[in-house]
Structures are given as structure tokens and as C-alpha cells.
Image: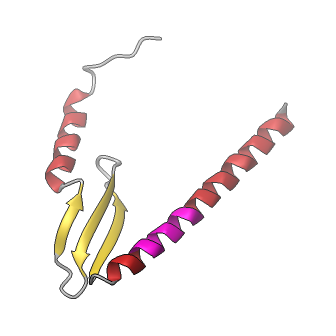
Amino acid sequence: MQQRRVEQSQRIEENRQLQRQQLEKLVERLDEFMSDFNKGLAFRLDEDTGRSVITVYEMNSGDIIRQIPEQEMLELAKQLSQHARGLVTEKV
């Protein structure tokens, strides 16, 4: 039983590494594609909400063209999560 758990953990970790490598390749390809239009992409994780954020910016000036989701939506999600604690309970 212990051996099976170890093998499953190893497979899960291998899958995560493969997914990360694939994601890195995709980001590289997107960066190449966007550079043709003099635009750049930035990916980050918003610490307060845990959501992925994508920013499209002008490469020459660094000006932000678009952020997905927008900053206002991130603030709203943050406020909702702070005020919603304790309002919903889960029964099993």
C-alpha cells in the first residue's frame, strides 16, 4: 500500500512538471507572437485573491493596455472574500 502511494505521488509530481514545461513553452510562443505587434504579456498570481492575472502592455513605453481581470474586479473579489467568511457553512 505504501509503495502504491509513493508511485502515485511520483506520477503526480511528474505530471505537474510536464504541465509546467508545457505552460512555459506556451508563454514563450505567446511572447514571440505578441512581440510582432510590439505588445508584451505578463503573467502573475494576485496574492490577495489567488487569481491569475494577465497584463497586456506596450513594449516600447511599458504602458498597460489591458489587464485581465481588471484591477476593480480583483478588489471586488478581495472584498467579497473578506466579508463572506462565516456566511456560508458546509455540512457533510
Q: Position of residue 75 (x, y in %)?
A: 17, 48
Which residue is drawn at the image coordinates 85% and 30% (left, top)? Answer: 1
Q: Residue furthest bottom?
A: 60
Quarter of the image holding residue 67? bottom left
Q: Which stretch did the figure color magenta?
A: 21-30
23 to the left or right of 49: right
For the residue pair 35 and 59, the one nearer the viewer reads as 35
Q: Is the magenta stretch mostly helix, strand or loop?
A: helix
Asked which quadrant contains residue 45, the reply is bottom left
Q: Which residue lies furthest to the left in this view?
A: 72
| Residue shown at 27% from the left, 84% from the top | 38
Image location (x, y in percent) of residue 37:
28, 81
Residue 58 on the magenta segment: no
The relative height of residue 91 versus residue 45 in the rendered view (above or below) is above
Is residue 21 rendered to the left or right of residue 82?
A: right
Q: Residue at x 35, y 62 (%)?
A: 44
The residue at 21%/49% (across/down) is: 74
